[in-house]
Amino acid sequence: MNSITARGLADEAELRGKKVVVVSATVDHARDAFEEFEALGRPTVSHVTRANGRPRIDFVSSGSVRFVGHRQHGELRGISADVVFVDWDVETSAAIGELEELYDTARKMTVTRAGARIIRA
């Protein structure tokens, strides 16, 4: 993930109070994306979770950014999101069945949120 994308998604969470989920190809890529967000040094971060496989940044605005590898998307069942960002490397590394399951989960996460969207990079 590049820094411009990270800034844009961080703005959604920090300034607009949106729930953002970033899906990367692997857990390592998800951790890299998390570190990219953390390096932005946003002043209104209320809590940072670095638990293995569950990194998350919460903002005072009630917005948050979660980071997962695409094979972890099952852990997101039952969670709603305003923005699900699927990084470009997911589509090049996932099998077709995995992609269908991932996008099905993403649709379920966004269905109850007005104006929610899935972004494919």
Image (cartoon, rainbow, N blue to C red):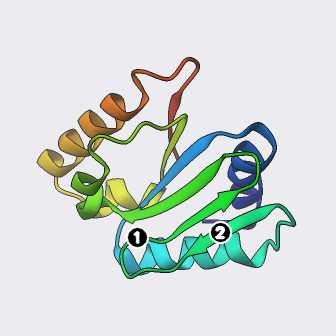
- Tell me the quadrant of the picture where the N terminus can be found: bottom right
**Residue topped by disc 2:** 47
Q: Is residue 29 above or below residue 5?
A: below
Left or right relative to 104: residue 79? right
Return the x and y of residue 92 as percentages of the image width and height: 33, 59
Q: Residue at x 56, y 47 (%)?
A: 20
Residue behind mark 1: 54
Tell me what residue is drawn at x 42 percent, y 21 percent: 112
- Where is residue 63 shown, x and y percent of the image? 66, 47
Q: Residue furthest top?
A: 114
Q: Residue placed at 23% from the left, 62% from the top?
A: 71
* 48 with respect to 52 (left or right): right
Q: Amino acid at mark 1?
A: Arg
Q: Nearer the viewer, residue 55 or 69?
A: 55
Q: How many residues crowd around disc 1 within 10 Å: few (fewer than 14), some, or many (20 or more)?
A: some
For this rendering, which residue is in front, 60 or 68? 60
**Residue 111 locus on image (x, y percent):** 39, 22
Query: Does residue 98 lie above or below 100 as drawn?
Result: below
Eyeballing the image, is 5 above or below 61?
Answer: below
Image location (x, y in percent) of residue 57 = 61, 64
Tell which circle, 2 or 1, labels the residue nearer the N-terminal end.
Answer: 2
